[in-house]
Amino acid sequence: MQENQQQDIYPSMTLESDNSGEKIAPVKLGERLKEIRKTLGLTLEEASQKTGLARSTLSKIENEQISPTYQAIQKLTSGLQIDIPQLFTAPKKVTATGRRDITRSKEGKAHPTSTYEHELLAVQLTNKKMMPFKSKVRARSFNDYTGWIRHDGEEFLLVLSGEVTFFSEFYEPVHLQEGDSVYYDANMGHMLISISEDDALILWVTAS
């Protein structure tokens, strides 16, 4: 990949922030305790045995009939082996966005350069955390490059066919064959050449 073409190959991966302004309801301690107990798979009786609090006391706390004393909170966190903040912090809700993008074989977006022939994958999605693409490695010599390639993020490389030599700024060159992979800091200077008879084929995944 040529350095002056990085903007084309690596589109923006900035995540959009949630500006919905949705108000977060205060955590009810009793409901939170009940949720934790059920997550741990404990009955009230079992929780009572672990915490040393009476079953009736636990029931009243869970039903918001009484507020636990600091001593009771210490028994709860010690007996249930949780941290105090867990009692007062609602679990983060993970909402699936339903994003999906299928790229059929040989239907990726072509992006040829002097050293690689890229096929960009999952191009329908924007603001991705990862940028996957397949590449045929045309370069056969270190001198085919004008300098080290560097860009933000981390990168994963998997050799699909052929054999390559992976050069990196702080390590000795390494030969990679079909099935071999390397994960590296993309801010570190790196480049790749094919040492097989045919152009090697690799899968690249770049993440911000």
Image: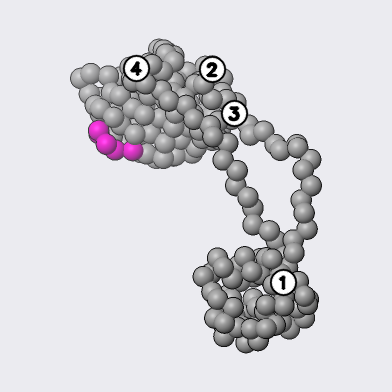
Q: Residue type at mark 3?
A: Asn
Residue 52 rendering spot, x and y as whole percentages: 62, 87
Which mark is first along the chain, 3 or 2? 2
Q: Residues within 10 Å of mark 3 (few under 14, many from 20)?
A: few
Which mark is first along the chain, 2 or 1? 2
* Residue 47, quarter of the rendered image: bottom right
Can you identify the residue that label 3 sits on? 127
Q: Residue type at mark 4?
A: Lys
* Distance (Cα) linking label 4 and label 2: 19 Å
Majority secondary structure of magenta residues = loop
Which mark is first along the chain, 4 or 1? 1
Can you identify the residue that label 1 sits on? 63
Residues drawn in magenta = 177-181
**Depth check: 185 or 169 in front?**
185
Can you identify the residue that label 2 sits on? 8
Instruction: Kindly state the secondary structure of the residue where label 4 is placed.
Output: loop
Which mark is first along the chain, 2 or 4? 2
Residue 192 rendering spot, x and y as whole percentages: 36, 27
Is residue 66 depicted above or below 164 in this figure?
below
Label 2 with label 3: CB-CB less than 8 Å:
no
Q: Residue type at mark 2?
A: Asp
Tell whether 57 sits left or right of 128: right
Residue 144 in view in this figure: no
Q: Residues within 10 Å of mark 4 (few under 14, many from 20)?
A: few
Residue 96 rendering spot, x and y as whole percentages: 56, 40
